[in-house]
């Protein structure tokens, strides 16, 4: 038997009441590519907006194997115990479409949180471009906040562009690193380090402890060479062990110290406003691009124009102009 479809009002009511089943269904609509789902989703998001914003949003990044899921499980339980409230764990993994099935935010990787009554774990949306995936996660944050989740973790893999997307939707960006073979600083891009409000070296346990401490010193030295961040906060470097639950308190003392600091100096509000602006333009860009590439006339022409450019029969500029003219003329008629 087909379940009765929920109306926009049903969704909003359920979400605001904190009904996790309704929240899940709403997130599914947000992630859906069907136009009629998108219409409902956008209305629900708009109606939830006044109830959102009251949270601390933390981005958590690290290469595969850095210990993200182990750490998030332990971090999540820790902050819920210490600070109360409710925690949503979301993810941005633009590769998940190709790898079939997200490896981030996977419930089976977070044993405690997946069954915790105060947590909501949701894997990465899988459809579309990084921009699309990131926008959906950002919209899901709004829904979760409206449902009373006052702590939001957004997980991503530390390989590049997805960090920028996560950084643009969180209040604190936590970078999980590992002690390597002495050349740890080579492996990570300067740009990612520069985004971090805190760098934490995981697996500081057993034989690895000394190496982790050494790595921390190297990171601290490297950070000295970076320009001072806009927030006025000096990014900190700590060591911890997610697996053995060591140093977790210090990590979260740092995060909340930062939150207090930027709420005090006004940067918290400023950064959120800047992020809203950023997402306005991101959404415009993404939807224009989508509309262009999904246009049937453009799809027919695209290959031909590409061929002409490759053969040297047409300059790239003229080819692009032909395509754009066709697109905009089509909008007028
Ligand atoms: P992810 O890919 O970043 O999510 O990493 P996982 O959380 O799956 O961890 C990768 C591996 O590192 C697993 O085998 C974990 O058991 C191990 N691991 C995670 N945290 C620690 C830690 O603090 N210390 C040690 N020794 N191992 C850890």
Image (cartoon, helix red, strand yellow):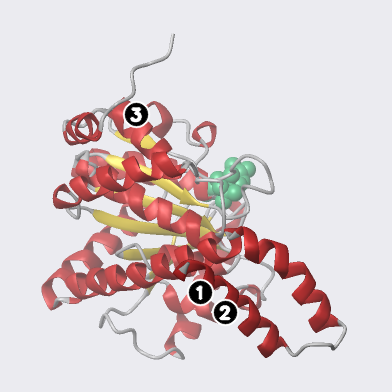
Mark 1 vs mark 2, CA separation in Å: 5 Å
- The reply to whether discs 3 and 1 touch (Cβ–Cβ < 8 Å) is no
Mark 3 vs mark 1, CA separation in Å: 51 Å
Q: Which mark is residue 325?
A: 2
Residue 245 seen anywhere in this rendered image of the structure: no
Foreground: 112 or 92? Answer: 92
Q: Is residue 109 left or right of residue 280?
A: right
Residue 213 image position (x, y, % from top left): 51, 67
Q: Residues within 10 Å of mark 2 (few under 14, many from 20)?
A: few
Say which residue label 3 marks. Answer: 116
Residue 148 vertical position relative to residue 206 in the rendered view, above or below: above
Q: Residues within 10 Å of mark 1 (few under 14, many from 20)?
A: few
Label 1: state its secondary structure.
helix
Foreground: 323 or 216? Answer: 323
Q: Is residue 75 left or right of residue 219?
A: left
Residue 122 image position (x, y, % from top left): 43, 39
Residue 10 image position (x, y, % from top left): 22, 29
Q: Earlier in the sequence, mark 3 or mark 2?
A: 3
Say which residue label 1 marks. Answer: 328
Q: Residue at x 58, y 77 (%)?
A: 324
Please tell me in which quadrant of the rendered image residue 77 appears: top left
Q: Nearer the viewer, mark 3 or mark 1?
A: 1
Classify the position of the N terminus by image quarter. Answer: top left
Residue 204 vertical position relative to residue 72 in the rendered view, above or below: below
Q: Residues within 10 Å of mark 3 (few under 14, many from 20)?
A: some
- The reply to whether discs 1 and 2 touch (Cβ–Cβ < 8 Å) is yes
Q: Nearer the viewer, mark 3 or mark 2?
A: 2
Label 3: state its secondary structure.
loop
Q: Residue at x 58, y 58 (%)?
A: 294
């Amino acid at each position: 038997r087909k379940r009765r479809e929920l109306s926009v009002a049903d969704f909003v009511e359920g979400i605001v009441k904190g009904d996790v089943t309704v929240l899940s269904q709403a997130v599914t609509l947000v992630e859906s590519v069907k136009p009629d789902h998108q219409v409902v989703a956008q209305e629900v998001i708009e109606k939830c907006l006044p109830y959102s914003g009251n949270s601390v949003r933390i981005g958590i990044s690290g290469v595969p194997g850095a210990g993200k899921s182990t750490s998030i499980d332990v971090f999540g339980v820790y902050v819920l115990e210490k600070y109360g409230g409710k925690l949503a764990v979301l993810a941005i993994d633009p590769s998940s479409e190709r790898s079939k099935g997200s490896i981030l935010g996977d419930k089976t990787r977070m044993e405690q949180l997946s069954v915790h009554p105060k947590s909501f774990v949701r894997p990465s949306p899988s459809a579309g471009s990084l921009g699309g995936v990131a926008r959906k996660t950002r919209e899901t944050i709004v829904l979760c906040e409206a449902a009373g989740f006052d702590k939001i973790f957004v997980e991503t893999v530390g390989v590049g562009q997805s960090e920028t997307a996560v950084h643009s939707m969180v209040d604190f960006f936590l970078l999980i690193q590992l002690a390597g073979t002495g050349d740890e600083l080579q492996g990570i891009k300067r740009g990612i380090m520069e985004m971090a409000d805190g760098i934490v070296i995981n697996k500081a346990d057993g034989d690895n402890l000394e190496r982790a401490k050494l790595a921390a010193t190297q990171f601290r030295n490297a950070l000295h060479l970076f320009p001072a961040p806009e927030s006025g906060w000096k990014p900190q470097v700590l060591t911890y062990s997610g697996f053995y639950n060591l140093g977790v308190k210090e990590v979260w003392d740092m995060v909340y110290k930062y939150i207090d600091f930027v709420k005090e100096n006004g940067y918290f509000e400023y950064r959120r406003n800047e992020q809203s602006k950023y997402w306005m333009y991101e959404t415009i860009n993404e939807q224009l691009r989508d509309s262009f590439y999904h246009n049937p006339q453009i799809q027919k022409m695209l290959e031909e124009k590409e061929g002409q450019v490759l053969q040297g029969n047409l300059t790239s500029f003229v080819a692009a102009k032909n395509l754009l003219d066709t697109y905009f003329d089509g909008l007028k008629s």
